Image: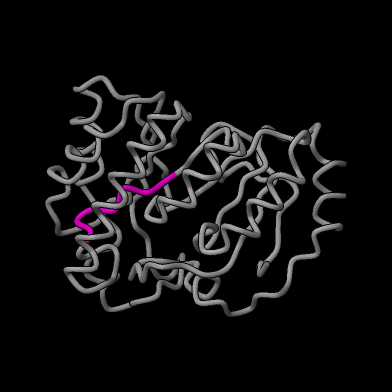
Amino acid sequence: MLTSGWKTVSMVDVQGKVTFTLWLCGCNLKCPFCHNWQIAEGRDCFPLDREALLDELSSSSFLVDYFHITGGEPMMQWAELSSLLTESQGFLPISLNTNLTIVGPMEKLLKDELISHIATDLKAPPQELYGLPPEASKRLWELFLRGLDLVSDYGIPLELRIPVARGFEQWPWIEEGLKHVRTDFYVVLNPLVGAPLTSPRDSAWCSEHCWPGGEVEKLKERLTEVGINVYVNDFSG
């Protein structure tokens, strides 16, 4: 199991919660704005010391709300992840940050009652934000919608994150995604940021589409109007 490490106490990975966060390597997307792309591509990664992780998780459990697994895309290592989550049951509720496109293995984790909370990004438009050819992006979007249905079928609480880009009409995709959410959820708007705050995978793309302005407030207003609880991450400072 390849990891880039973990953080014993984090206050930024799940809205309003304190987490013990583990980063896993690998990803099936090529998001141009990604600032964890080195993890996603398997750079600076090393085998997980499971015993050391579980020891720290046990000793830190009284401080945090969730054992949060992120990446990269953790489901790229789903078999090993399933084993780890089974072994860590009893320490903390488990939160998984996933792009929800690896649907079959995800259902196995949910069926085994290993997941207590899901965080996912609704990336819109997918043909731009997935960083893949149009047909592949279309197929992955369809899998993402199936993933939302699956999370809803199992009644798992959801943190629905929306990366806000500059220069795109994102609402039609957001509206379609929301139709597939039938579980307790809230939305976190994440304005896409680039240099100098982050080092994105595609600097040219990010120079054109990162650092949105009025798009953030517009989306917040539309989501609030339909009764959705919305948070906005502020990276301006």
- The residue that appears at 48% across and 30% down in the rendered structure is 156
Say if residue 40 shows up in the picture. yes
Q: Is residue 159 above or below residue 164?
A: above
Residue placed farthest to the top in the image? 227
- The residue that appears at 66% across and 67% down in the rendered structure is 3
Q: How many marks?
A: 0
**Quarter in which the N terminus is drawn:** bottom right
Q: What residue span does the magenta drawing correspond to?
A: 120-126
Residue 125 x/y as whole percent: 19, 56
Residue 137 x/y as whole percent: 23, 64
Is residue 223 left or right of 200 when viewed as pictured? left
| Along the line of sight, the residue nearer the viewer: 52 or 230 | 52
Residue 236 x/y as whole percent: 40, 52
Is residue 233 left or right of 166 when viewed as pictured? right
> Residue 186 sits in which quadrant?
top left
Colouring convention used in this rendered image of the protein? one colour
- The residue that appears at 17% across and 49% down in the rendered structure is 170
- The verdict on residue 150 being magenta is no
Say if residue 236 shows up in the picture. no
Q: Is residue 55 above or below residue 52?
A: above
Q: Is residue 185 above or below residue 195?
A: above
- The residue that appears at 52% across and 70% down in the rendered structure is 26
Q: Is residue 4 above or below residue 184?
A: below
